[in-house]
Amino acid sequence: MFKAIRSLSGSFGAGRRYSGRIDSPTQILSNTYWFSSYDNSAVEFGSVLANNASVTTWKDQSGAAHDLNKSGNASVKPIYQSNIKNGHGAVYFDGVNDSLNCNPIPFLQSLSQFTLFVVAKAGTLASGTTLTSTDTDGYKIFYNGTNWAVTGAGGIAASTTVPDTNMHIFTLVFDGSQTGNDNRLKFNIDRVSQTLTFSTNVGTTTSASAAYFYTGQNSANAGFFTGHMGEVILYSRALTSSEIDSVEQYFINRWAI
């Protein structure tokens, strides 16, 4: 059994530190995406959504207005479903062709650090099923056919955790200033540090050509996710240990995980 940890690394990140409760992820300073399905309001989706209504826009609540979108008819869009966990709704992806993506954003390119959080509940999984990715397969959390796996800055690593159908907090941190794969890429599930087996080496920066950020699919317009996503947050730096702890505790309080 894994031992719960309080952070991913004591040396990651710089700047403002938090050791206690936060009420919003934007209290932690960084270039940030933040998508939440806490309720069905216009703040989250641009308009009030009925249960099982199609999600055309998932609003970025960071203040930068980098929204996730999907054009086309309802068959290629995820839906909003209410009362999924702790009384809160979530975005449901059907695993066939549902996904959302953002427009090109420069801060995704050539990052030397990032921190990615995803709150998600998987349903049926096939090899390659992807929670998040970019068009260059960076910032990626996916199922490799056996376990949860991750990528960052060219590094690909498998954890020892086999997915289940519960809602979890996924935390992926990349810091290219560190030395060695294990120090550059770290992965938590529900605040538990994952032992990673690397099949490729982790570089010092993410791709210079990364432009799009995807939820529910990989870069090849495949690997569609089946299940619910409650929140997705991407910071453009490696958060400090105390900041990671605060964000994960925020998820625990909100989603009762």
Image: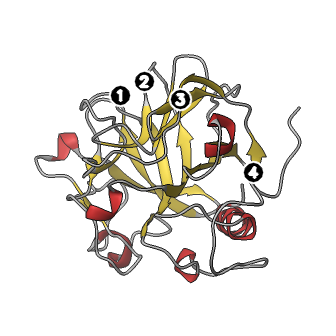
- Give the CA separation, mark 2 to mark 1: 5 Å
Q: Earlier in the sequence, mark 3 or mark 4?
A: 4
Residue positioned 46% across, 64% down in the render: 236
**Residue 158 image point, x, y percent:** 60, 26
Q: Quadrant of residue 57?
A: bottom left
- Give the CA separation, mark 1 to mark 4: 26 Å
Whether tag 4 and tag 2 are in contact, CB under 8 A, the answer is: no
Rendered image: mark on residue 201: 3
Q: Nearer the viewer, residue 249 or 151?
A: 151
Q: Report which residue position mark 4 lands on.
A: 191
Q: Amino acid at mark 1?
A: Gly
Whether tag 2 and tag 1 are in contact, CB under 8 A, the answer is: yes
Q: Earlier in the sequence, mark 1 or mark 4?
A: 4
**Tag 1 secondary structure:** loop
Residue positioned 45% across, 20% down in the render: 126
Q: Earlier in the sequence, mark 3 or mark 1?
A: 3
Rendered image: mark on residue 223: 1
Q: For the residue carrying disc 1, how many other residues have a C-alpha within 10 Å: few (<14), some (14-19), or many (20+)?
A: many
Q: For the residue carrying disc 4, how many other residues have a C-alpha within 10 Å: few (<14), some (14-19), or many (20+)?
A: many
**Residue 115 image point, x, y percent:** 55, 57
Q: Report which residue position mark 2 lands on.
A: 128
**Tag 3 secondary structure:** loop
Q: Amino acid at mark 2?
A: Gly
